[in-house]
């Protein structure tokens, strides 16, 4: 027997753990036979059973292995309920009758190293009705299943395309309209919400999807609160939006026969959770998740349900709630803002600039632009605010317009697509200026004593929030006075070799924004003196 490659084994074990955590009946390395003697047999990487559905997972080290395997997998799948013997398996959890009751077969490829673009692989596999999990999907479901347990099953079933019987259930509700959108105020049992509402993975191939990573600590705190407090109240509404699929929308009716009730489906993951997922998921291991218990039937959570809300509006609603109304991790807000189609939202243009800037030299991933990334020398939010957005681009909250020197060099229209036409030209210009400026800063972080660039030194503040915002103030001061030919900043930034960016020095400066301006004043003062300029730092 050929020895299993370590990468294949690791990938397979991850998939098995995801499915086990999610509550499926799972086995792996299943060797089955269709006839006697056992000449007609084959092996399956991972199998999971849900009712009369069989999920077949093929784990591949590379996309190169796809072509010769796809047709073979699909041909043998439907034959599994005709097998005569299970020769062996790693966990020995399946018996023949498990396969014989299967009516539906679903296929998924988990690929470790996608040498082609993910979207191309996804398109190819979906054309053959096969689901594709890339590294990010596996990482997401692994982390989520460890945290949410069996609740993750509903999301996996939804992704694979398995829906339970759609049953329309009535609840007392109030119907209102806001700016042309139809929404309902009602109460729902936690067990229903856990089944029907889901937070689709932010890193999926659908750019409009979103949700922040669930915090285990917050879940644990809420779960303990639910279990210990018998008379607790949850007044804040969970916000959901029903899927726009016809089979879902056709089951939604309001005031049927004058009953002032909302009739709606409760099938697996039929509604997107726009806000409130911690409140909902914290019920997963409590008595309220058991629909047979009286407490569960009597206890309901306030819910705002949109009948139909386009995905961009869902994203904007999420941002508006968490940016303007309640506090949330600003890295997520900026990350999501970068996915908006235009720059009408104040963080979108700057967020996309920083994300693109982070992809190449000199940053090369040092900026934390997503919650799934480790903390870098600076976060996307720390890079954007206050200087890049409010000084360099010059965004004014009062008139919602841009007035800064970077914007004036190449203007864009905020209500038009960010990366087309005039706006793309402006974006490329802004990105080029920022990239060349920071490349020059990195080049001039050379320390003659240590004989190395201090740019990557954690004890050196040039690439952290203080250094970056001070440098952006310097860039703003320069661009206000002149347009540098070809954006060659080396002439001025050689002065950085004489500036103290050590953390010890930064601690001696003013606190907060004052530290940025103090450091910027020190730099611009040296530039003015050496080159006989009159640049001024202003906010």
Image: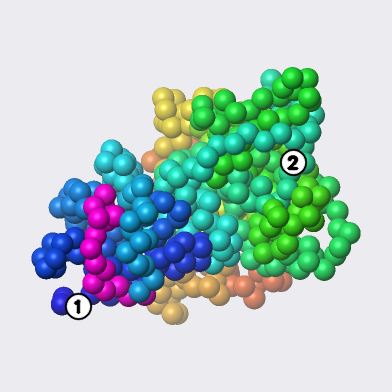
Residue, disc 1 = 3
User: What mark, if any, has residue 303 been given in the picture?
Assistant: 2
Secondary structure type for disc 2:
strand
Residue 474 can be seen, yes or no: no
Residue 246 can be seen, yes or no: yes
**362 left or right of 475 in image:** left
User: Which is nearer the N-term, disc 1 or disc 2?
Assistant: 1
Q: What separation in Å lies between label 1 and label 2 (alpha carbons)?
A: 53 Å
- Magenta residues (range): 77-91
Residue 78: image location, x then y, percent: 26, 49
Seen from the viewer's position, the closer of residues 61 and 289 is 289
Circle 2 Cα neighbour tier, 10 Å, few/some/many (<14 / 14–19 / ≥20): many
Q: In which quadrant will I find the N terminus?
A: bottom left
Secondary structure type for disc 1:
loop
| Quadrant assignment, res 232 | bottom right
| Quadrant assignment, res 226 | bottom right
């Amino acid at each position: 027997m050929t020895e299993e490659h370590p990468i294949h084994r690791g990938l397979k074990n991850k998939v098995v753990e995801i499915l086990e955590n999610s509550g499926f009946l799972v086995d792996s390395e299943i060797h089955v036979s269709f006839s006697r003697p056992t000449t007609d047999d084959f092996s399956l990487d991972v199998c999971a059973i849900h009712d009369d559905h069989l999920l077949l997972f093929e784990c591949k080290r590379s996309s190169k292995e796809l072509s010769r395997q796809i047709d073979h997998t699909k041909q043998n799948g439907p034959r599994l309920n005709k097998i005569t013997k299970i020769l062996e398996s790693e966990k020995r959890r399946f018996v023949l009758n498990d396969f014989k009751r299967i009516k539906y077969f679903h296929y998924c490829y988990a690929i470790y190293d996608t040498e082609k673009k993910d979207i191309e692989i996804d398109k190819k596999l979906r054309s053959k009705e096969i689901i594709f999990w890339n590294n990010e999907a596996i990482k997401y479901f692994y982390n989520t299943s460890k945290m949410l347990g069996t609740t993750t099953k509903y999301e996996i079933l939804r992704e694979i395309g398995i829906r339970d019987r759609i049953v329309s259930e009535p609840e007392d509700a109030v119907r209102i309209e806001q700016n042309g959108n139809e929404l309902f105020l009602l109460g729902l049992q936690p067990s229903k919400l856990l089944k029907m509402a889901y937070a689709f993975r932010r890193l999926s191939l659908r750019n409009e999807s979103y949700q922040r990573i669930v915090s285990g600590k917050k879940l644990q705190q809420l779960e303990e609160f639910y279990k210990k407090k018998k008379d607790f109240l949850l007044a804040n509404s969970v916000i959901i939006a029903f899927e726009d699929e016809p089979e879902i929308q056709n089951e939604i009716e309001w005031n049927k026969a004058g009953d002032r009730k909302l009739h709606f489906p409760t099938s697996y993951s039929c509604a997107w959770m726009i806000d409130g997922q911690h409140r909902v998921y914290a019920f997963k291991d409590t008595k309220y998740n058991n629909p047979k218990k009286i407490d569960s039937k009597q206890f309901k959570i306030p819910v705002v349900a949109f009948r139909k809300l386009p995905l961009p509006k869902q994203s904007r609603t999420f941002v508006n709630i968490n940016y303007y109304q309640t506090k949330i991790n600003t890295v997520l807000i900026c990350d999501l803002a970068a996915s908006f189609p235009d720059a009408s939202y104040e963080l979108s243009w700057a967020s996309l600039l920083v994300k693109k800037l982070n992809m190449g030299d000199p940053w090369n991933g040092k900026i934390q632009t997503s919650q799934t990334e480790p903390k870098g020398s600076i976060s996307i939010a720390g890079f954007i605010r206050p200087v890049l957005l409010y000084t360099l681009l010059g965004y004014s909250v009062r008139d919602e317009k841009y007035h800064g020197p970077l914007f004036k060099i190449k203007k864009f229209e905020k209500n038009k697509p960010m990366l087309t036409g005039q706006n793309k030209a402006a974006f490329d210009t802004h990105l080029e200026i920022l990239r060349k400026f920071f490349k020059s800063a990195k080049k001039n972080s050379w320390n003659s004593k240590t004989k190395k660039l201090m740019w990557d030194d954690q004890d050196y503040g040039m690439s952290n929030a203080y250094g970056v915002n001070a440098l952006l103030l310097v860039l703003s001061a320069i661009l206000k006075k002149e347009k540098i030919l070809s954006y060659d900043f080396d002439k001025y930034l050689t002065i950085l070799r004489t500036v103290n960016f050590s953390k010890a020095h930064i601690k001696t400066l003013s606190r907060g924004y004052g530290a940025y301006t103090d450091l910027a004043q020190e730099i611009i003062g040296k530039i003015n003196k050496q080159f006989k300029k009159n640049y001024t730092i202003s906010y």
